[in-house]
Amino acid sequence: MNQGPAAAKVTKLNRIERNAWTKQKIFEAATKVVGKHGYAEASVARITEQAGVGQGTFYNHFENRQELLDQLLPKIGLDMVEFIRARTGTAHAARQEIERFAAFFEFIGEVPEFLRILNEAEFFAPVGYQKHLDNISVAYVRILRRARLAGAIEDFTDDEFEAIVHMLMGARGYLSRRYSYSAAGVTAVPEHVISAYRKLMTRGLFNPSGEQDTP
Amino acid sequence: MNQGPAAAKVTKLNRIERNAWTKQKIFEAATKVVGKHGYAEASVARITEQAGVGQGTFYNHFENRQELLDQLLPKIGLDMVEFIRARTGTAHAARQEIERFAAFFEFIGEVPEFLRILNEAEFFAPVGYQKHLDNISVAYVRILRRARLAGAIEDFTDDEFEAIVHMLMGARGYLSRRYSYSAAGVTAVPEHVISAYRKLMTRGLFNPSGEQDTP
Amino acid sequence: MNQGPAAAKVTKLNRIERNAWTKQKIFEAATKVVGKHGYAEASVARITEQAGVGQGTFYNHFENRQELLDQLLPKIGLDMVEFIRARTGTAHAARQEIERFAAFFEFIGEVPEFLRILNEAEFFAPVGYQKHLDNISVAYVRILRRARLAGAIEDFTDDEFEAIVHMLMGARGYLSRRYSYSAAGVTAVPEHVISAYRKLMTRGLFNPSGEQDTP
Amino acid sequence: MNQGPAAAKVTKLNRIERNAWTKQKIFEAATKVVGKHGYAEASVARITEQAGVGQGTFYNHFENRQELLDQLLPKIGLDMVEFIRARTGTAHAARQEIERFAAFFEFIGEVPEFLRILNEAEFFAPVGYQKHLDNISVAYVRILRRARLAGAIEDFTDDEFEAIVHMLMGARGYLSRRYSYSAAGVTAVPEHVISAYRKLMTRGLFNPSGEQDTP
DNA sequence: TATGAATGAGGCTTCATTCAT
DNA sequence: GATGAATGAAGCCTCATTCAT
């Protein structure tokens, strides 16, 4: 997912490249630190140490600590969107939704830092959290509208879609905290969580179709 | 909900009563402070100042700052459970669920501090958060099983119920953040949120019944 | 050594007796606490808890914390003097000195609290420490003078005696710290410590006599 | 003994020098403060104020308060060893021992802070105290063994040497407290203390020689 | 006399940010 | 641009002592 700057161990970089490279190092260090220890423990000292740069260097690239923290989630959030989109097929809308749901948990497995970066962002990086929520919400509502257009959903207004999307995001959040965290890192989500979600969605949100709920 | 000790401005209290009264003062002060500024800003100095007692007094009643913070949510959480129970009628199970959902938001209106105390607890008062989650989760699963027994729900296992409950709690959490917060305090949740929830639940979780979804 | 007030579990005590009893309880509690945890950890709260009385009670019997601490060492110090006197025979002066030296370490074994109470007193109970030092010093000089009178010591002035006594006390202090302390409490002092002391004293301080240093 | 950084009030220092200079300032401030008020009163605030640096600066140079305190005694202790060695001639072993004894008290006169730093270290800087004791003890035992090899001492085992060394250190400690402390600072030790020590040692520890005890 | 809650000064430590090199 | 020492505010907690009951 993230091949990192180390891959580009070029000897000669011009000023701009070196600059971007340093910033990128800090960024990745912050991702690691926050993912492993949480925002609260992500002091500038810790991040710069992990990045292998001086503390003062930090302030050549970011206005202050908060600015960096607020960029973390939106950036990885977009990675997630892309990841999920890639795993979503062209089947019936309801089945796609289940695929998205499952892909979310797969992404957590691939990028374990995401869990903490997402879940703690609300309180430690509210600006970034809002940005992320907007990103997701807008994209998700668009998906639902398209499904409605295709006849897979009926009887929901746009406003209701927005509410639904928040419910779905909330469900993911709580479920990930409940089932994915563990002392030894991130674990896969149990099957019955998926099945419960499928039942709730295919019956509650989508129209019945030949594909679903038949033995 | 909370008539507070101020109501009992009696001149004479014995030692035990005075003691309990002081603790209660601190407790209420903490509720106010956390509700308004969040756990992170709830320093002992701020809480005791709000309570009108010396900083040292705090430690006569609580082992340390964290102990108090961890008691906040479970205590108010039980108030909430009681509040919701009182607002839940004896109608069909699905309708009851909608009543509970609406009552949750009503409770937020009554006790505006609850929102932050709940939402931030996971990171700032994890012990209290877990206790609260257990309280709610157990009670909620019991409700769902009873509904299944009564025939209002079919085709969900106990494990799935637990997952469902986390989805419902997550939905409430995200919705409350999206729709109840506001610069000027806590506002009522829009009608379309309720309707979206009703549709999702009455179709997705409960069996169809004569009561639901009819004009 | 200390049969304690508990032995006098009489039901009826007059006011004066009750008073003295309470003070004694506090005193013994302090001895235990200081002996086990040191002066620094001997907070009024800890002492009164150990004594089973209220914190305020303390100040009915002692002006302040320091006053009690300063009484601890002189009191036990007198116990020690008495203990050592009882173990000192009537042999030649030099042999008596060795007996006193050995008895000192026996006393430490009998009253393990003494070690810390003595060694830490200099910094945490300077007044009591001085009083103790004076007690010991005066008594010890008197012993040496008597030995000189008896012809067992020659060639030392009174001033030199005082210096010698401080050397002896210092020797005991450092030796007890080096050889008696241990994780599991107080241990006996090794034989070579005694023999080294005997050689130094019988040759350095006392006149040769038929009794000493002969095979 | 300690010409201090003030002597080098150079305008230009590179980063490394400035860094070392700051640490040295803190160190010297601590020496002064502990020497004058004792470890217990040596708060970080007091030390940094004396050093003329901010409180936070302290933690750029020492892990915590205790680490500094534990370095104090060993450092000055080595100064003392060097000081004493320089004052010790090549005369007979017994005379050398008296020279060392006298030099100890001279050192106290030169570095008055040493007295408190040494005497209180056992309880307030136990790690440093142990290190110092080991330093001294090892060196001292080596001296005694050499004297034994040269025939100036007979009849003492290595174990007994260790005990003797602790006696000598204890004697110095108690004597310094008794005779060197005073309200107006540190005073010279009276002649009769030296003479008493000389008699005890030249007779008790060393073999008689033509040099000693002759008029 | 006994009690124990109330007090507040003071201690140690962390950390985001600045700034001279 | 990079560095890292310096800063000081702010936080949590302990504890001897007081005082009303």
Image: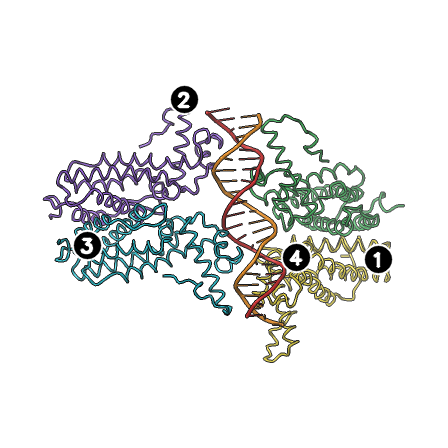
Chain colours: A purple, B cyan, C yellow, D green, E orange, F red
Q: How far from the left and from the top, in percent, is residue B211?
A: 14, 58
Q: Between label 3 and label 2, give the one nearer the viewer.
A: 2
Say if labels 3 and 1 share a chain: no
Q: Is residue B56 left or right of residue C4?
A: left
Give the residue pinned by disc 3: B156
Q: How far from the left and from the top, in percent, is residue A202?
A: 16, 46
CA distance separating discs 4 and 1: 27 Å
Helix, strand or loop at mark 4 = loop
Helix, strand or loop at mark 2 = helix
Q: How far from the left and from the top, in percent, is residue A47?
A: 44, 35
Q: Quadrant of residue A186?
A: top left
Give the number of the disc on residue C153. Answer: 1
Q: At x 68% / y 29%, what residue is drawn?
A: D9
Q: Nearer the viewer, residue D70 or B34?
A: B34
Chain holding disc 1 = C
Q: Between label 1 and label 2, give the one nearer the viewer.
A: 2
